[in-house]
Amino acid sequence: MSHSVNAAEAIAQLPTDVHQSPLLNADLAPTPASARTWSTYNFAALWISMAHCIPTYMLAGGLIAVGMSWTQALFTITLGNIVVLVPILLNAHPGTQYGIPFPVLARASFGTKGANVPAVLRAIVACGWFGIQTFIGGEAVKTFLEALWPAYGQIGGGASLLGLSVPSAITFMLFWSLNILIIYKGMNAVRVFENWAAPLVLVMAVVLLWWAVGRAGGLGPMFDQPSKLQDFGAFWKVFVPSLTGMVGFWATLSLNIPDFTRFGKGQREQMLGQTLGLPTTMLAFSAMGVIVTSASQAILSGVDASKLWDPVFLLAQLTSSTPPPGHEVPLIASGATRAVVAIVALLGVGIATISVNIAANVVSPANDFANLAPRHISFKTGGLITGLFGIFMMPWKLLASADTYIFNWLVGYSALLGPIAGIMVVDYWILRKRVLDVPDLYRENGRYGRVNAVAMVALVLGILPNVPGFLKSAHITSGPPSFFDGIYVYAWFIGFFLSGAIYYLGRRRE
């Protein structure tokens, strides 16, 4: 079964009157003591694997592209991850304390039925991320296939499916199938996969770093470039939405982290593992991206510099039999060596992408969809639903431009998730003082009620101020700059604190 937890043991922990509750299935039941095996290393490895992905590698590049220096970019990334670590650790506590996943925890603040609202909002965002990561992984496979077999790119003769070329559609579905296969192996397969994927991905990154710096004869020209944002006002205008985007990058995990910490041995293990794993890894891998890209500018001086932020593009140049612009011979002369490098690079990129995709974008929505109808939707079925929605959201359109990706996607969905995090943190830490009645979380008519109207009002009021700015950013509406445009760049922060405050005041008046 899912999660590698004995179903009878998981349900037997609860009172007998709850066993037939429509709000319960084995995947949503509290994790029994026998299955709480995750150590500090497991949590650190989880974050190392999730952070070592192509979007992380490219984060610093995006910030430098909008005018930051490499030091400003790394500072923004590090600060954003320290900020988002706070709600992550706050919402992680009840997962370890009570062994419950995110959608069950949300019942305490939103009600047993009302919890479906934040669960579905979180699930929809995860579906988009699942599709984005799957598309990136599929494009990596396509790139390396073309390097080894140039005719692959001509399959379909220029035909497209929903805006996706036939070769891209084939590799997208291949990568999609690999993700679904691992989902059907269960939660323990995720833990095992993360444990051996983490060190392998690190080794791959270090090897690429060593090659690029050695071939360039140094760190490259980027380290000599000053910031294009010369005064504080210009820097602040770029810094704030960028910081919000960095927080938004992991805002999804700040909600569903109980889906993982419910398997932890104790609070110390999960807190230490996450603190060691998230900010340090994001900084280190982003720095690797800066160094490799800077060195690559020296190596591939005749190539469009804007493409060098994509490690897949860079690795394709390494494995291509065609010399890059400005070179008379391929970067790797031996055909056999190129083939080996292509295979190893494909494994590295593939492992990194699958690892983060399953951990960050499948576990939570699978539980969230299961929460809609626990008697009919299992963890595996929820994972399949996530995968299907990931296709329907056409992720290649979400990645159409940097503006769409950062301001419409990252900042946009942070406006939805910030309010949920604020409400949950206030409910558990301030109002309930970390005390939950676990059996009542599975009772339709228990103390938590079906729908908490205060939470719903707080959620809506926390989202509303950011709606006009999002519509303007997405070019759905137009007009002169307004107050709402100015606050939209703070979307996650406004939602978190506004909804949290409204929820606190509303519950105190009851």
Image (tube, rainbow, N blue to C red):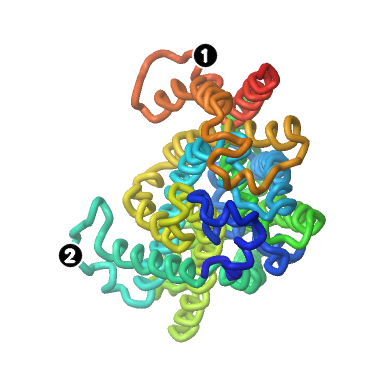
> What is the number of the mark on residue 483?
1
Q: Nearer the viewer, residue 336 or 442?
A: 442
> Are the residues flagged by discs 1 and 2 in contact, CB closer than 8 Å?
no
**Of helix, strand and loop, which one carries label 2?**
loop
Image x and y of residue 367, in percent: 51, 53
> What is the number of the mark on residue 62?
none
**Of helix, strand and loop, which one carries label 1?**
helix
Three-letter residue code for mark 1: Phe
Image x and y of residue 251, in percent: 59, 42
Image x and y of residue 236, in percent: 63, 26
Q: Nearer the viewer, residue 316 or 263?
A: 263
Vertical placement of 368 versus 300: above or below? Answer: above
Could one spot residue 466 in this view of the protein?
Answer: yes
Residue pointed to by mark 2: 157
Structural crowding at the residue carrying mark 2, measured as other residues with C-alpha within 10 Å and reported as few (<14), some (14–19) or many (≥20)? few
Three-letter residue code for mark 2: Gly
- Please tell me in which quadrant of the rendered image residue 246 appears: top right
Distance from Cα at disc 1 to Cα at disc 2: 50 Å
Q: Residue at x 67, y 41 (%)?
A: 84
Q: Which residue is drawn at 25% across and 63% down?
A: 166
